[in-house]
Image (cartoon, rainbow, N blue to C red):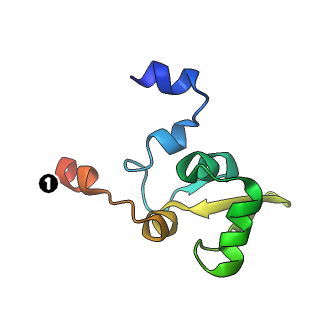
């Protein structure tokens, strides 16, 4: 299944969002893959308070905290908690 996802062009961060630590950061292409929304819609959702504001990295690049994205999108990391137990 992983090969079919990679062939479809989905970033690995989106594929493994449940396994990433809450402190990890993801970029815009990952956020677009998670939401299936355009760049414009993502920034509109940020303005509306639906998504958290990005963190500036390397000057003009933006990244989002995985924990905040999970909370905003209602993504649970139940599988991670089971693996850790």
Query: Within the image, what quadrant is residue 74 found in?
Result: bottom left
Q: Is residue 43 left or right of residue 76?
A: right
Residue underneath mark 1: 85
Q: Is residue 40 left or right of residue 5?
A: right
Q: Give the answer, above or below, for where 15 lies relative to 68.
A: above
Q: Quadrant of the N terminus?
A: top left
Residue 2: horizontal and vertical position, in percent?
A: 43, 24
Secondary-structure class at tag 1: loop
Q: Quadrant of the C terminus?
A: bottom left
Rendered residue at 48%/70% (across/down): 72
Rendered residue at 44%/63% (across/down): 70
Q: Residues within 10 Å of mark 1 (few under 14, many from 20)?
A: few
Q: Is residue 57 left or right of residue 27?
A: right
Q: So how many labels did they put on this image?
A: 1
Rendered residue at 60%/73% (across/down): 52
Residue 11: horizontal and vertical position, in percent?
A: 58, 37
């Amino acid at each position: 299944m992983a090969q079919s996802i990679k062939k479809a062009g989905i970033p690995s961060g989106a594929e493994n969002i449940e396994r990433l630590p809450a402190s990890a950061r993801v970029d815009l292409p990952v956020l677009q893959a998670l939401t299936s929304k355009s760049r414009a819609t993502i920034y509109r959702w940020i303005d509306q308070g639906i998504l958290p504001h990005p963190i500036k990295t390397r000057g003009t690049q933006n990244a989002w905290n995985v924990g905040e994205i999970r909370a905003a999108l209602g993504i649970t990391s139940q599988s991670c908690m089971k693996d850790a137990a």
